[in-house]
C-alpha cells in the first residue's frame, strides 16, 4: 500500500489570529478553530491548512502531511526510514514520521480504527 497524496499542510505560527486572517484574505475559509489557538482552513477542493500557534521561542515550521488509507496495511519500502511508527493522536487519527534520503522528515496520517 502507498500514500494517496497530500492530506493537509501543517503550519506553525506565532500568531494564530493574524495567520488565519492572512489565509482568509487569500480565499481560504475557516473550517474550524480550537480553544488552543489553532484551526483549519480550506480553499475549495485543495488540501486544508492546519495552523497551530507555538511559543515565540519555538522555531516555525511547515509540514506536508501525506495520506495513508490504512495504517495496518502500510508497509514502507526499504528506502523509507521510519523515524516513528504509527501512533494514535488525540484528534482521531494515526500518525507516522519517516525520513527521506536528504534527511527531511515527513508525516503520514491514517484514520484511527474507530474513525
Image: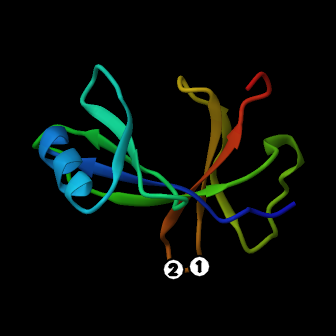
What residue is shown at x 35% (from left), y 47% (from top)? 29
Residue 26 location, quadrant:
bottom left
Outermost residue to the bottom: 102
- Left/right placement of residue 5 relative to residue 106 reads right
Labels in figure, total: 2
Residue 6 location, quadrant:
bottom right
Give the camera-side residue of 39 and 86: 39
Q: Which residue is mark 1?
A: 101
Label number found at residue 102: 2
What residue is shown at x 64% (from left), y 33% (from top)? 93
Q: Estimate the x, y position of residue 89 in percent, counting from the top left.
A: 57, 29
Residue 28 location, quadrant:
bottom left
Q: Estimate the x, y position of residue 88 in percent, counting from the top left.
A: 64, 29
* Picture quarter with the N terminus: bottom right
* Picture quarter with the C terminus: top right
- Left/right placement of residue 1 relative to residue 111 reads right
- Mark 1 to mark 2 CA distance (whole Å): 4 Å
Whether residues under marks 1 and 2 lie with C-beta atoms below 8 angstroms apart, the answer is: yes
What residue is shown at x 43% (from left), y 59% (from top)? 63
Q: Estimate the x, y position of residue 86 in percent, counting from the top left.
A: 69, 41
Q: Estimate the x, y position of residue 49 in percent, counting from the top left.
A: 40, 52
What residue is shown at x 73% (from left), y 52% (from top)? 68
Give the camera-side residue of 1 and 99: 1
Label 1 crowd (10 A; few <14 / some 14-19 / many >=20): few
Q: How is the image coloured?
A: rainbow
Amino acid at each position: 500500500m502507498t500514500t494517496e497524496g497530500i492530506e493537509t499542510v501543517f503550519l506553525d505560527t506565532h500568531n494564530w489570529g493574524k495567520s488565519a486572517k492572512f489565509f482568509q484574505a487569500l480565499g481560504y475559509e475557516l473550517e474550524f478553530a480550537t480553544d488552543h489557538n489553532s484551526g483549519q482552513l480550506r480553499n475549495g477542493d485543495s488540501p486544508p491548512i492546519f495552523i497551530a500557534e507555538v511559543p515565540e521561542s519555538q522555531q516555525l515550521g511547515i509540514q506536508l502531511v501525506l495520506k495513508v488509507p490504512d495504517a495496518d496495511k502500510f508497509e514502507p519500502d526499504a528506502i523509507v526510514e521510519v523515524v516513528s511508527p504509527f501512533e494514535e493522536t488525540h484528534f482521531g487519527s494515526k500518525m507516522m514520521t519517516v525520513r527521506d534520503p536528504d534527511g527531511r522528515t515527513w508525516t503520514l496520517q491514517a484514520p484511527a480504527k474507530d474513525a
